Amino acid sequence: MNNEFQRYAECLQEFQAILSFAEKFVNSLVGQQPSCKNDVYGERIFVKLLCHAVTLIKISPSIETNKQQELWDISSSYCLARALIESFDALSYIALANIDNQEKEFRLIFWKLHAEARRFNMLSKIGSTDPRVKHTEREVDNLKSKLLAHNHLDMCSKGLRKDIEKGNYQPYHLTQRQRNEEAGVSHEFRDVVTMHLSSHVHTHPFSVMQIVDFKAGSPESIGLMSIAIQYSSGFLAKAVQGMLQVFNKSTPVMDTKAKDAYSKWITVVENGVKKS
């Protein structure tokens, strides 16, 4: 096995080790009573994140099988990695942030308002006559009223109140940089990761030109496929770290292999890879 395949195998094994622990951890939560609605959503978002991770492994190159019989789908791999990172964003904002109960409630309403307004907008555009459309519209109005009356809104910028009054709803009231700082994520690293993955997700010229040189089974191509695993490992590790802090009762023991990979990738995400 050449160096590129060896490095890929090591990255894949690290990712699998962290994921294996994460799955055991989720199973350990069965029967535990969440302390608030945010934790309920947090647990579900974490499971969503793990689903992305499991599927990413399934479509990533395997070392054991005949590589000539595999489809190395770089775009789908990068899509899943991007989706995993987006899930981490939501998880951190809703459930992992170290904030008081008032702000937790505010964030949940803010997040839900964006989702319901988006849903209503889509249903309206297709001309749906389903009775639930009216219910969705009422839910948007209800959530908007709750948000405008919420005490935490006075602690936010005046522009945010104006946006809500105008019906300009966003999923988060904090900028990406603010959310990264709150989550303990290097903003520069997260920014580069997103840009790199997006070049394939959105079919930019860079990704189209790269298809010409992409040959499944080649050392160069395995390096590109490894990137999705590497980026995902970091944000999976950060998600596990946050969940362990929120749900810290009767958690399973992390074995040495998983612990080493977990610590390594948390360091990368928190500090980035730029040399000083």
Image (cartoon, rainbow, N blue to C red):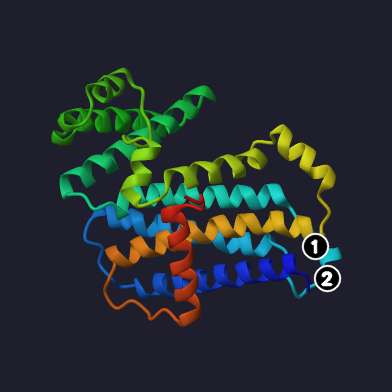
Residue 168 horizontal/vertical position (percent):
36, 23
* 56 relative to 118 in the view: left or right: right
Question: Residue 70's mark?
Answer: 1
The quadrant where residue 113 appears: top left
Q: Quick one: SS at disc 1? A: loop
Residue 267's x, y, as percent? 43, 61
Question: Residue 93's mark?
Answer: none
Q: Is residue 209 left or right of residue 199?
A: right
Give the quadrant of residue 218: bottom right
Cβ–Cβ under 8 Å for marks 2 and 1: yes
Q: Which residue is mark 2?
A: 66
Give me the residue at 26% from left, 53% from top.
37
Query: Label 2 is placed on what type of residue?
Result: Asn
Residue 175 visible to the viewer: yes
Q: Is residue 131 visible?
A: no
Q: Residue at x 40, y 50 (%)?
A: 185
